[in-house]
Amino acid sequence: MTAASVTRLLAALPDRLPGLRALYEDLHAHPELSFQEFRTAGIVADRLRRQGWEVSEGVGGTGVVGVLANGEGPVVLLRADMDGLPVQERTGLAYASRATAVDGEGNEVPVMHACGHDMHVTCLLGATAQLAAARGEWRGTVVAVFQPAEEVGGAPAMIEDGFLDRFPRADVCLGQHVAPAPAGFVGTRPGPVMAASDSLRVRLHGRGGHGSTPESTVDPVVMAAAVVMRLQTIVSRETGAAQTAVVTVGSLHAGTKENIIPDTADLRINVRSTATVVRDRTLAAVERIVRAEAAASDAPKDPEITRLNSFPLTVNDGPATSTVMTAIAGVFGEERVFTLPQTLTGSEDFGVFGTALGVPSVFWHFGGADPELFRDIDPETLLTDGLPETVPANHSPYFAPVPDPTIGIGVTALLAAAAAWLCPEDAPAPGGQED
Amino acid sequence: MTAASVTRLLAALPDRLPGLRALYEDLHAHPELSFQEFRTAGIVADRLRRQGWEVSEGVGGTGVVGVLANGEGPVVLLRADMDGLPVQERTGLAYASRATAVDGEGNEVPVMHACGHDMHVTCLLGATAQLAAARGEWRGTVVAVFQPAEEVGGAPAMIEDGFLDRFPRADVCLGQHVAPAPAGFVGTRPGPVMAASDSLRVRLHGRGGHGSTPESTVDPVVMAAAVVMRLQTIVSRETGAAQTAVVTVGSLHAGTKENIIPDTADLRINVRSTATVVRDRTLAAVERIVRAEAAASDAPKDPEITRLNSFPLTVNDGPATSTVMTAIAGVFGEERVFTLPQTLTGSEDFGVFGTALGVPSVFWHFGGADPELFRDIDPETLLTDGLPETVPANHSPYFAPVPDPTIGIGVTALLAAAAAWLCPEDAPAPGGQED
Amino acid sequence: MTAASVTRLLAALPDRLPGLRALYEDLHAHPELSFQEFRTAGIVADRLRRQGWEVSEGVGGTGVVGVLANGEGPVVLLRADMDGLPVQERTGLAYASRATAVDGEGNEVPVMHACGHDMHVTCLLGATAQLAAARGEWRGTVVAVFQPAEEVGGAPAMIEDGFLDRFPRADVCLGQHVAPAPAGFVGTRPGPVMAASDSLRVRLHGRGGHGSTPESTVDPVVMAAAVVMRLQTIVSRETGAAQTAVVTVGSLHAGTKENIIPDTADLRINVRSTATVVRDRTLAAVERIVRAEAAASDAPKDPEITRLNSFPLTVNDGPATSTVMTAIAGVFGEERVFTLPQTLTGSEDFGVFGTALGVPSVFWHFGGADPELFRDIDPETLLTDGLPETVPANHSPYFAPVPDPTIGIGVTALLAAAAAWLCPEDAPAPGGQED
Amino acid sequence: MTAASVTRLLAALPDRLPGLRALYEDLHAHPELSFQEFRTAGIVADRLRRQGWEVSEGVGGTGVVGVLANGEGPVVLLRADMDGLPVQERTGLAYASRATAVDGEGNEVPVMHACGHDMHVTCLLGATAQLAAARGEWRGTVVAVFQPAEEVGGAPAMIEDGFLDRFPRADVCLGQHVAPAPAGFVGTRPGPVMAASDSLRVRLHGRGGHGSTPESTVDPVVMAAAVVMRLQTIVSRETGAAQTAVVTVGSLHAGTKENIIPDTADLRINVRSTATVVRDRTLAAVERIVRAEAAASDAPKDPEITRLNSFPLTVNDGPATSTVMTAIAGVFGEERVFTLPQTLTGSEDFGVFGTALGVPSVFWHFGGADPELFRDIDPETLLTDGLPETVPANHSPYFAPVPDPTIGIGVTALLAAAAAWLCPEDAPAPGGQED
């Protein structure tokens, strides 16, 4: 790649950053739950239109798709996700969220951009602005996808809403995620980059009664506790060191009062895995344990196990990933681009687009944490030792990427990656190509 | 006792039963949460006034007190409690509750008379009607107490609202509770009749994060499960066969989504005990275990343990209990009156009145379950073997005393017991007296 | 009873106490495992013969029976048990045991009289000496039974060895046990006095392998731990306050090395209960939990559950118990004889004799702990609050009754009880008789 | 490498295989525990001497060292370990072990070559025979180390016994281990190849007593079960997917009888880790949990935590590993030599020699399982999905490498690797060198 084309694509970015920062703070202050991103989608559509993009709203619920056709050339899909999470923000930021919303079960819950999707929207709107403003620097078509409801696997809703037929078919799909790594660094890997994720709802049936006469009941709270303790053994005893599985009981709810033994207990369980065989085995073990613990309690009724959602493995195309990493390293320097040593346990539905289109995908992570937090840490050890406790991770009530330099990095990475296809002098053939 | 006076007190009861049954069904269909018994209190006050009682409303919140002075003689306090519970009724009765209410934490919850307080109100209003209608048959003063919020220990609120000064000071306090025993039977015992009850709220502090990276969190769901499993050992290993303790975790709530590890988990724990030394030891063990399990999890912050409420031991005065049992047996026959072999694990705040007044109390249980359910059961074994599974216990979503003969039995027991003091020819000296 | 006859029976006791104390210390220093009581039985037979009793040895293995016929009159069976336990004594006494023996599984184990059977033998030999020496004071026949192997339920072995036919058939069976109560006190109760006891051996099957690859194994250590934790819920959640059950896992053995996951884990479980319905339910729950936890672990083979031994409920005959308590109170004073408020959770096979003979039994406890340890304790609270931690209980490595006054009390209690039948002026009719 | 030199080194191997097979079966039938390898060491020394090696016995206990100086050239250390394990063999082989031995705690235990060290000894004796027989084909010195007690970390005993001064200082250390992979395949990796291993003995202190009165005890069986369940959470919740930790409780022993609650419970715990930070964190977590669970039980005394042994990370030198893999692939073909994708969780003390000498080490694995067992399995999946259940792993009672072709492969791999240094035409400079 000649740095020249990317340099020109990026030329006006510094002037645009103050506005993007204001946008980011506004989005952060107004998070919306999955499939409820009405305000966010409105802002996105409005900005895209003003930038000169052809805009479709309400794609797959609250999704927005912008198309910018700019002559012959490859079609590049750039994707951001828009939804927040039911988390009570505790960052103490001036622009912290105070939003609440009614969730799918009718409960009013706090809402927070605890996964950084506000950053994703901001960066993609920054990239679309640059692309629209510098049409002379590139050729082809860009499809900017602002997806709803990534947290609950909303990508299929866009596909089911005619995405493949309604918009130019992309030659490559590009996406990114902000991570609790130092701002300024980018990482990815060819092959499986993010884990499969399967979520279950388990309702355990006991038999309620008065808290003073447990002998006339089957206590679902004790049953649930035994299930939780036993589920730990799937990872600790049934998963080898060469395999990856994570089993999290993210929510456990039972009972209303201290002296009434309830009839049921509800668990929500999330399973991560990076290989199909481990995934199958782990899901089978969860069910085996849930049923056995119900039997141990002499439950009057079998547990109900319901699939909530499933995210497939996110798999990066090898040559396209090499192209993207080279392009980004060309801007940031080799020392700021890492090959991840293994599949991350986080999950994504980004891969749904590439799979549906039958084209290569590349998904990368860019750091959003204050680099000062890492001042005394050997960056190499981050890959093996994990995050220091002082750095809030995604979904934490304290998670908030620093706007500067994260926004600039995110916009630049999108543009550099897209330019590998869109800038004629060095665009690879569709499907990616090793340099 | 001469059966004569009681017989005359009871004379018109059969005519009154259809109306009491309608009242009971109405109350059952319209349960109210603790301290929200506005509708119930209104009905009580209205009925009492129409019967000719002097009525005070709003005593200790929503309490109602009726006074009927009928010449020289002992002052007898009769008490019923009025509140329902946040339970979703599942009886399928025509008059089943469909009520909901907003609880103390702002949540809308279903409400049900799952503890039979509707029966208590009905029986006491039946008794007050008979007393008012048959003033010639007795002498003295009756104080009819319709107490709010028994489920959360509301009796002290009435005492704090000037109860001792505002109403005639009773010589004896009488109360009753409907039980999942066959309708037609009454049981009690001298000495401790109901357990002490202490309720705690425990907030466990973990450190939240993404469900895929548990290593950067302290998982409060696992911490809570370990606490629940460990709490079982207080009863199984630390409580002797000669002692009674019950430790129930009635509610456990943590998290909102399957893939977010929450920051905290909240438990509500109820402890029953029938001796002070066991009570102290059990409460200390709960705290010890909660703190140790937090330490085992490396919790970033100590658990918060808050006392929610405490019910004292309910202790029946020996001679007064003998008087009451004799009086009731005089009406129902000896074979229908049982001495309970030991303290029940249920709790009550009825004892607060006798303790505050410094006078004897007697509290008894009367069966409310369909006798058909017990057809093949040796009644003796009920006292040792516990309730058959087919009989719903108090606080169950299926608990609903059969109106007939329960209402008649409950009214009769109150009148027979009160008559032991109020019917001059055989009233004992205040304070109770063995025959 | 006239104190006179008992007084004369007891006349020479003070002179005999030093010899009995030496005997006790010798027996204590030389404990023998169940059915291995060869030395003890030899001493017993030798002493009985020298006292003038007709002696049979080897009854039911190592049992000894002495018969002393002394004219017309009731036949009274007095029983002591002889075996020690596989416990490493830690009393630090000069006469502490240093014995070892090979147990039934071929392991060499330490042996200790940790249950006080040495005291039982000593007291019964003291009583037989007095009875032989004071034949003029009583009439009838005494059958002195020195039973082997009480710890493993050895009484049936004597019955199966022709006990009923070989020895005079008793009219009443009397037995006693030393307890961790203050020396000088005696307690018992009519009806169930000691619990039923059922012991199980559970072998859990996992699949062994290297400690570094648990995923290729089924870890029986984790399976066993889950079983132990879950068994706690039988008592804590499935047993009512009106019921008594105790579930103890007394032994748990699995594995040889830290880095080899073994194939199996072995548990030994003891269940106590004081009512048949609770016993049946508890044993069923143990099996249910063991099988369910094996299923939760995906065990390659069902657990093996083997019955080790069963002790029936020990039930005291009502009138005979009254006779015995009155007789003992006549010597010690009423204030030293307690009615136990409930069935003890300890178990005995003493009841096997009365049941086989079809005659009344009475079994009582006598204190053996240094009264100084109870100086600051209200004796009433002992019955409800349990033993202070400073007093070692039966089966503890620190359990050792103080010889003085325990031996004198134990001999006296046996003689006073027997005299109620044997001393003609006040002997009740066979079968016991309330005074 | 020219295959020529290795080919000549291997020339007579086919004739030697029947004898090596007989040796292997003899060693397999006569396993010996760590530091008790007297018979094995005798056979080794005898064979080496007859082959013409200079032999030292009793090095570091039962170790044997053979030295063969063959002119100027590099010094190559070849190492095999000799000890068996306390496992009851269940292979059903004609030459299965029936051996028993007395372990370090005085217990008689079965012994088995469950880790394949018999194969290691056989292969190294095959290699030494070839080296001695074909001195014309190589130049330099070989130090053949037959190490005792690998299972308990015996290598340091040889170092402490003057190994560095007594024998020629090697330029490179080579070792191998038979694995449950298909016979015919070899695998290794540069960098960390085997995990660190730390073993702990934990004694939990309760307070014993009678099984029927748990309330007067602190039950160490329940305490141990709670510890085991809680330890699972270290791997399941505190270890990230990018990290490796294994925590195994390989042995748990408490109590002697079902109705005696013991004073103590003993656990043996093994911790594997592949990074220092994870190792430190995991060991700290084990201690934290053990202490907290003792506190939860109100233990009368702190747990005792004793370090049993520690194995360091086994780290392969990068260039030397490349040399070895190339050399072995030169004989077997590239398709039979795999680069392991990650550090194995097994541990070794082989690395102690290279570390003490300050020279490069290479350690590789060679398959010993019947290839038929893998007929339907994609070899690629073995690296991620783990071993099929039908293939017994090391330390299993069913583990037994097939003699043919495993012995031939093991001898050949040792010779091919050694030849990379010893065969002049292509020997790298000491320290290893990439081709």
Image (tube, coloured by chain):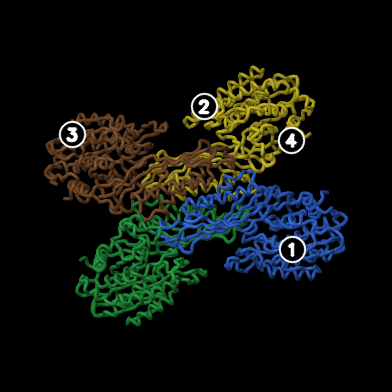
Chain colours: A brown, B yellow, C blue, D green
Name the chain letter of the residue that bears numbered label 2.
B
Disc 3 crowd, CA 10 A, few/some/many (<14, 14-19, 20+):
many
Q: Amino acid at mark 3?
A: Leu
Q: Amino acid at mark 4?
A: Glu
Q: Can you tell which of label 4 and label 2 is closer to the viewer? A: 4
Label 2's element? loop
Name the chain letter of the residue that bears numbered label 1.
C
Label 4's element? helix
Q: Which mark is residue B245?
A: none
Q: Do marks 1 and 3 both belong to one polypeptide chain? A: no
Q: Which mark is residue A68?
A: 3
Work out how far the residue at label 2 is from the one at label 1, CA to CA, in angstroms. Answer: 72 Å
Give the side of residue A433 with respect to residue B135, left or right: left
Name the chain letter of the residue that bears numbered label 3.
A
Q: Quadrant of residue C260?
A: bottom left
- Quadrant for the N terminus of chain B in the image: top right
Label 3's element? strand
Q: Which mark is residue B335?
A: 4
Q: Can you tell which of label 2 and label 1 is closer to the viewer? A: 1
Q: Are marks 1 and 3 in contact (CB under 8 Å)?
A: no
Label 1's element? loop
* Residue position marked by numbered label 2 in the rendering: B99
Asked if one can make out residue A245 in the rendered structure from this viewpoint, the answer is: yes
Give the side of residue D75 with respect to residue A204, left or right: left
Residue nearer the viewer, D205 or A301: A301
Residue nearer the viewer, A369 or A79: A79
Q: Is residue B265 above or below residue D121?
A: above
* Residue position marked by numbered label 1 in the rendering: C162
Q: Are marks 4 and 1 in contact (CB under 8 Å)?
A: no
Residue B127: give x, y in percent of width and height: 68, 24
Work out how far the residue at label 3 is from the one at label 4, CA to CA, in angstroms. Answer: 91 Å
